[in-house]
Amino acid sequence: MKKQVLILCTGNSARSQMGEGILRHEGGESYDVFSAGVKPTHVRAEAIAAMQEVGIDISGHRSKSVDDLAGQSFDYVITVCDNARDNCPVFPAKATQIHWSLEDPAAVEGTAEQRLAAFRRIRDELRGHVTTFLRDNSGKS
Amino acid sequence: MPGLRGSRVVKRRVLIVCTGNSARSQITEGLLRHEASDQYEVFSAGTHPAAVRPEAVTVMAELGIDISAQRSKPVAEFERQQFDFVITVCDRAREECPVFSGETQRLHWPFEDPANFTETGEARLDAFRRLRDRIHARVMVFLGEGTYGSEEKR
């Protein structure tokens, strides 16, 4: 039985989408991964591009509302928002709550190059968090 | 930084081609210009130019990008011009994709032809939005390709 993981942010457009893609890619054999936002918008093109650069296709992902997952049970709920600036969403569930504080790359304005650089930076931070998560939770039943 | 010659930026010329120059190539033109008009001069054309699809104009306007003044043009209009990139955005399996000669880098980004969209109303606009978003992601990958490798080596 795979562990159920929900990754949560505000827009479900950048951080939680990349996190979902990375965790599924790295640990999909042990985890069912979902993502959602409190104010779903659309998956940012820069997120799809930054993920494609590391060989992960999230082009089929959609921004989804956390309301659509109400009633579903999860083993882990991971919030990926910026402590300093966001209101971090709360998902009331009997789950291990984990928080990764990450800046919102979608908030970066500028040239395409500057925006892509911001998304790559957050993508790489997420890869680090996912590696740690998988290491810390391997072997737990 | 690519395209920099002294203090003057030499823009690279891009021609985007599909069949009708009515949706895919128009959307791509609008997105590439929107994202990187400082680096690229962008044109589009079709092998069988028709008219710009109103749905394409609508879904681009949703991103704040106005392509209402773009028109469908035949590839022949550009035959004698030089381009750094010629990008075909048609579905090679099912359509006739033009071949451009000359010193140009040819790229192929296959996208399905919206002429085959069977949806109506809002579902039809949704299909155009999905197409727009797929093209947008491809454009960002293209724009990132010049910088990603060098960043990895840091």
Image (cartoon, rainbow, N blue to C red):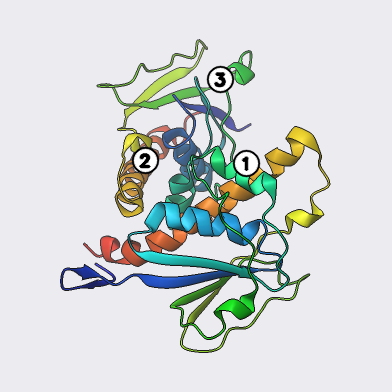
For disc 1, the marked residue is B58
Amino acid type at circle 1 is: Thr
Task: Please report, as a chain letter, where disc 2 is located.
Answer: A
What residue appears at the point 65 percent right and 64 percent down from the top-left corner? Answer: B21
Left or right side of B65 for B100: right
Pointer 1 with pointer 3, Cβ within 8 A: no
Task: Please report, as a chain letter, where disc 3 is located.
Answer: A
For disc 2, the marked residue is A126
Amino acid type at circle 3 is: Val
Which residue sits furthest left? Answer: B6
Q: Distance between the residues labelled 1 and 3?
A: 29 Å
Looking at the picture, tell me which residue is in the foreground, A119 or B113: B113
Query: Can residue A60 be seen at all in this image of the molecule?
Result: no
Locate residue A117, reporting x and y percent: 31, 50
Q: Which mark is residue A66?
A: 3
Determine whether the residue tagged by mark 3 lies in a helix, strand or loop. Answer: helix
Mark 1, Cα crowd under 10 Å, few <14 / some 14-19 / many 20+, is some
Locate residue B150, reporting x and y percent: 27, 66
Q: How far apart are marks 3 and 2 (CA)?
A: 21 Å
